[in-house]
């Protein structure tokens, strides 16, 4: 007795020979109105982010806020402990001096900024992602080796499996594959 599986089309994957051909195809698809595109390549391709219409990252702002929070927390902690909570007069020195707090302030700034960078990158990229329907495609394995793949997601308003695959072939795609979500 066989068990029926419910598979729905998740997108079309196109395999291009060169990064230039992939970049040209992305530009052409975007000019025709396609919006839900992604590129899988073994190395970064200059201009791909702009061609895909990717927005600038907010990570830099988050890292700056994390660093500022670290500096503020370090200064506040040192001032509170030295001047308010446990003031000690040692050799006539002031309870709090900014000059002596610079090393700890620097260290906490770098610590919180780096934690913010790593955690923010994971959160903004939606990682870790252990599964995506494109992983079901036969040619997906070459994405980190020698393939230049273009993914057209089924959620795109202009998506039609046959028409999109034919369009990819007309743009120089060597092989297309309609992949399913299992």
Image (cartoon, helix red, strand yellow):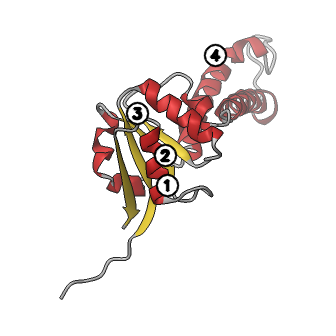
- Going from N to C along the chain, the mark reached first, 2 or 4, is 4
**In front: mark 3 or mark 1?**
1
Where residue 100 sits: x, y (%)?
70, 13
- Going from N to C along the chain, the mark reached first, 3 or 1, is 3
Residue under label 1: 163
**In front: mark 1 or mark 4?**
1
**In front: mark 2 or mark 4?**
2
Q: Quadrant of the N terminus?
A: bottom left
Residue under label 4: 103
Whether label 2 touches label 3, CB < 8 Å: no
Does residue 35 sit above or below 114 in this rendering?
A: below
Callout 3: SS:
loop
Residue under label 2: 167
Does residue 23 sit above or below 4 in this rendering?
A: above
Where residue 44 sits: x, y (%)?
46, 26
Instruction: Give the alpha-carbon distance from disc 3 to disc 1, as whole Å.
Output: 24 Å
**In front: mark 2 or mark 3?**
2
Whether label 3 touches label 4, CB < 8 Å: no
Q: Is residue 136 visible?
A: yes
Left or right placement of residue 37 versus residue 74 in this view:
left
């Amino acid at each position: 007795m066989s068990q029926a599986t419910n598979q729905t089309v998740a997108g079309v994957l196109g395999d291009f020979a060169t990064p230039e051909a992939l970049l040209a195809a992305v530009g052409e698809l975007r000019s025709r109105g396609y919006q839900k595109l992604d590129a899988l390549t073994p190395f970064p391709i200059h201009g791909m982010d702009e061609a895909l219409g990717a927005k600038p990252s907010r990570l830099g702002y988050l890292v700056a806020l994390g660093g500022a929070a670290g500096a503020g927390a370090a200064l506040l902690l040192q001032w509170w402990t030295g001047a308010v909570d446990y003031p000690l007069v040692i050799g006539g020195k002031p309870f709090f001096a900014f000059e002596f707090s610079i090393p700890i302030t620097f260290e906490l700034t770098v610590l919180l900024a780096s934690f913010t960078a790593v955690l923010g990158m994971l959160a903004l990229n939606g990682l870790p992602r252990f599964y995506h329907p494109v992983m079901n495609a036969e040619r997906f394995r070459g994405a980190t080796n020698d393939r230049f793949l273009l993914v057209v997601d089924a959620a795109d308003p202009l998506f039609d499996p046959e028409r999109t695959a034919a369009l990819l072939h007309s743009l120089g795609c060597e092989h297309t594959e309609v992949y399913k979500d299992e």
